[in-house]
Amino acid sequence: TQLLEQSPQFLSIQEGENLTVYCNSSSVFSSLQWYRQEPGEGPVLLVTVVTGGEVKKLKRLTFQFGDARKDSSLHITAAQPGDTGLYLCAGGRSGGSNYKLTFGKGTLLTVNP
Amino acid sequence: NAGVTQTPKFQVLKTGQSMTLQCAQDMNHEYMSWYRQDPGMGLRLIHYSVGAGITDQGEVPNGYNVSRSTTEDFPLRLLSAAPSQTSVYFCASSYSRGVETQYFGPGTRLLVL
C-alpha cells in the first residue's frame, strides 16, 4: 500500500515557468519533509513542516502542509535548470519510540533552458 | 566533516555471492538507516539502528543483515545475492529518530546477475 502519492510523476517545463507538485495521503502525518535528489546523489532535505496549514518559503520554493496534515504541495516560481531533480516527500508518524518515515515515489522535474 | 560516506560506489555480483555495503558517518548521529531505491518504488527502508548495539527491521528486510558495533559504522550485508536485490542503496543518518534532518550518503549501485 502506497501511503504517499506524489503527482505528477514526471514534469518537463521551460525555464521561467511556474509549477506545483503534490503529495497526498489518506493518513495523517505528524510531519512532512521534502527532499531533492540529483542524479547520482542521495536526497537532500529542503524543508520540514509540522503544523497543519503551515507555509514555508525557501527562495523561489513554497511549501505548504495541508490543514488536516494529510497532504502537502511544493510550488516553484520561475523555475531554473538548476531546479532539475527528483523531488521526494516523506511523511513522519510517531508512535511512542516507534517513529516511522514513509517516502513517496517522487516527482521527476526537468527544467529546460 | 565528510558527512555520510558509502563504499563501494558500484558493484556487480553474481547470484549467490555475498558482500557488505559499508556506511560511515562522522556527525555522531545516533540514528542510522538503510534504504533501497528502485524505479517506480521510491525509497524503502531495509533496516535501521537507534544506537550502537541496537538494530531493527524496516519495510523490506528479507535477504539483508545489519549490525551496529560503533556509533559511526552501519554495514549492510547481503548473504546470498539475488537479482531482485539489484538496486541503488542509500545509507542515512540523523541526530535521533524523529522529526530530524536525515543526511543521505551518495549511494551504492548494485547489479546482481
Image (spheres, coloured by chain):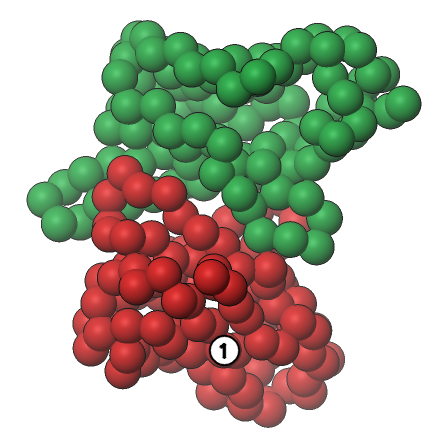
Q: What residue is at 27 percent from the left and 82 percent from the top?
A: B69
Judged left or right of residue B94, residue B40 is right
Residue A89 locus on image (x, y percent): 48, 32
Q: Which chain is red?
A: B
Nearest the camera: A69 or B50?
Answer: B50
Q: Considering depth in this image, is A104 or B29 the residue closer to the camera? A: B29
Q: Quadrant of residue A56?
A: top left
Residue A85 to residue A24: above or below:
below
- Percent x, y for residue B87? 62, 64
> At label 1, which amino acid type do we have?
Gln
The count of marks equals 1
Examine the rendered structure and indicate whether residue B79 appears above or below residue B53: below
Q: Is B65 located above or below residue B51 in the figure?
A: below
Write down the residue under mark 1: B22
Which residue does the image show at 69% across and 36% down from the upper left? A85
Residue at 34% from the left image edge and 12% from the top image edge: A54
**Helix, strand or loop at mark 1:** strand
Q: Colour of chain A?
A: green
Q: Residue B7, percent across and down?
A: 58, 76
